[in-house]
Every structure is written in C-alpha cells, then in structure tokens.
Amino acid sequence: MRIAIVTDAWHPQINGVVRTLEMTRRELEGMGHEVRFITPDLFRSVPCPTDPDIRLALTTPRSLALELDVIDPDALHIATEGPLGWAARAVALRRGWPFSTAYHSRFPEYLQLRTRIPTRWSYALLRRFHNAGCATLVPTAGIQDDLGRRGFRHCMPWSRGVDLDLFSPEGPQLERGPEPVFLYVGRLAVEKNLAAFLALDLPGQKWVVGSGPQEQQLQRNYPQVRWFGWRQGAELASIYRSADVKVFPSLTDTFGLVLIEAMACGTPVAAFPVSGPIDVVGRGSMGGVLDEDLQRACLRALDCDRSAVRRFALRYNWRVATQQFIETLRPIAQTLPPGDRLIERLSPSERLALKLQN
C-alpha cells in the first residue's frame, strides 16, 4: 500500500510529532508499505508568528493536489491541522477521498497561553477539521474521552512506542558528581511550564535538554542550570541514563514521548497528575511519581527502582502502535472525475520537475 502523509510538523523541528511520524514510517516500510510525505519543505514557507522555529507552508489546495497526484496514494493520512492539513482536507473532500487525521497536541490550550484566544473557538475549528475524516487518531484513552465530550467523532487509539535498543539502561553515561540530577527534555516554550520545575528547591543539579522560543529568557533567569541544547539518538540516551529523575512539568501534553524514552533508560518520571502523565505513567505505577506538589514528586522519584521503571516501559511498542495506525486507514478509489487529475494537465517538463522535487 502506498500511503501519503501530510504534515505541517517536519524537520528541522525536533518534537514528538516528528519523531512519531519518523518511527511510524520505519515500521510501515518494514511491513512492506510505501510511505510518502508532503511537508513544508516542498513549498515556500514563513515562520509561525508565535514560534519562529515552526515554518508555515504557503500553498493552495491546487498545489497540494498536484503533489498528491505525483504520489498517487492508496490511502491518505493528515497528521496536523496547519496550512498543509487544511489544504489536504479540501482536496480529499472535493475528490471524495477518505482520510484519517491525528490529534497530537492540545492546540487550543497552547493558543490560549500564547494569544488568549478562548479555547472554545479553537475546539470548534478543530472539531470541524477532524470530523470530516473517517478517523481521528488520539494517543491516550483520556484524550479520547475528552474529545468525545467535546463533540469529536470517530476518535480511535494510536499509542506510541520507544526504541528499546537505543533507549536502554545499558550504555555510556555522562560524568557527574554524587548529588542527584533532575532532568528536563523537551521544547523550551511557554506551554511546557518549565519554570515550575526550574524554580523548585531541589538538591543537586538541574539539567535541561532542548531548545525553543523561551530558551534565552530561561537561561538568563536560571544560570545555575546545565543547558545542553538539543540532543538526539545515542547522545540523548546517555543523558537520560545519567540522570536520577526525568521531570515533566507540562500541564497540557497529550502524551509525552520523552516520558517513555526516560523510563526505557530506567529513569523514573516526576510529573503532575494530568492528562499525558496519568495515561503514560499512571498513578502509583512503577514508572515514576505523580503529585500535585512537583517538588514532592521529584524527591519521591529518587527512591524508585530503576529496573522496575525499565520493565514498565517495555509495554510501549512501535509495531503495535503502527498496526493501530494501519487499521484506521481507508482505501482511496482510484478513479477521479474527468479533468480532476491535475498532473495530467501539465506539460512533460512540468511533470518532470514535480517528479524530481519528490
């Protein structure tokens, strides 16, 4: 099966959405499927006003339809609700193509934090976007229930996994002293609530891995913190296994891949008991400590059994998650109305340019 995935989140962004799509592609190709992405780097783009690290594609449904015609997909997944997502939605609806969507982030809450736009407005827009599809993929049961109460239809589970060979307790560690190390990994942005961790009175050191729009401000406010910038792969795994506790102060995440990466390295999680940590780590689990008092959660997590934390993480499997993804796809009929296949109207040189671009 040839699967087209349209996403506004892509490199050079480093976040859970991009990592999820990369790992899903790896698993799909391992199962024998062909995966083709339509991403902002195929179009002219501009920086997002509230976050310059994110590029917004300048495109139209017609331009996106041409890209889809080059791919000629058997199934379509629209991963994000940005300009590319809306353009793909318009093309699919006009052509009568079924498509699945995904709810990766609590965008209404993020937008309210950055712009004060009421969440009810944003949820109404997202409900319109997602309800046009055949399935809305959600990462946890808690998010599925919440969206159902808000009028979202066809919500279906799409869990996440972790590379258990890369993220493992075995392997190199960073040099450090005997005092505890409390670690944060993720974007440095207002919705991550990072100051709630950095302002805590904790023994030992605080380490931060990541980058984002709040980076310079946070570095000025908390000069005693060890700042790593972005790290990936084996380097990130070394940092995880070198820390005593992975702190997750966010109140708005839908899942948190960093939670299972840390636990796979044997590093327990300290977090608030909110959506995301509740579903991924759980109250009273072996994976860490959830508490309304984040300082208390951090200190209690120091006593967690790291081998038990690792065993807890083994339940997260990319192959199982990808099978959930496949089951929500619906086949596209290979017939279009006369003249609707836009690529057939192009000259040979225009078709060649599109093929080389892809």
Image: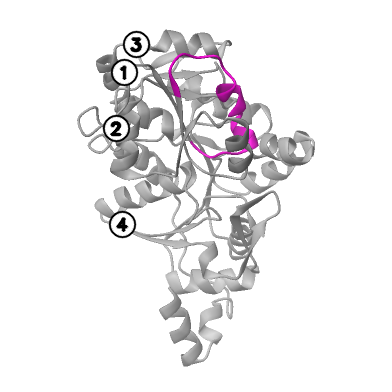
Query: Quick check: can you spot residue 57?
Result: yes
User: Is 123 drawn above or below residue 195 in the view shown?
Assistant: below
> Marks 1 and 3: which is nearer the front?
3
User: First in sequence: mark 3 or mark 4?
Assistant: 4
SS of the residue under disc 2: loop
- Residue at (31% x, 41% y) in the render: 235
Q: Is residue 187 magenta?
A: yes
* Residue 347 placement (x, y as % from top left): 51, 91
C-beta proximity under 8 Å, tags 1 and 3: yes
User: First in sequence: mark 2 or mark 1?
Assistant: 2
- Residue at (62% x, 50% y) in the render: 81
Q: What distance separates the C-alpha of mark 4 from that of mark 2?
A: 39 Å
Mark number for residue 304? 3
User: Is 67 drawn above or below residue 296 in the view shown?
Assistant: below
Please state which of residues 212 and 323 is positioned toward the viewer in this rendering. Answer: 212
Q: Which residue is disc 2 drawn over?
A: 174
User: First in sequence: mark 4 or mark 2?
Assistant: 4
Q: Which residue is disc 4 drawn over?
A: 33
Amino acid type at mark 2: Leu
Magenta span covers which residues? Answer: 186-205
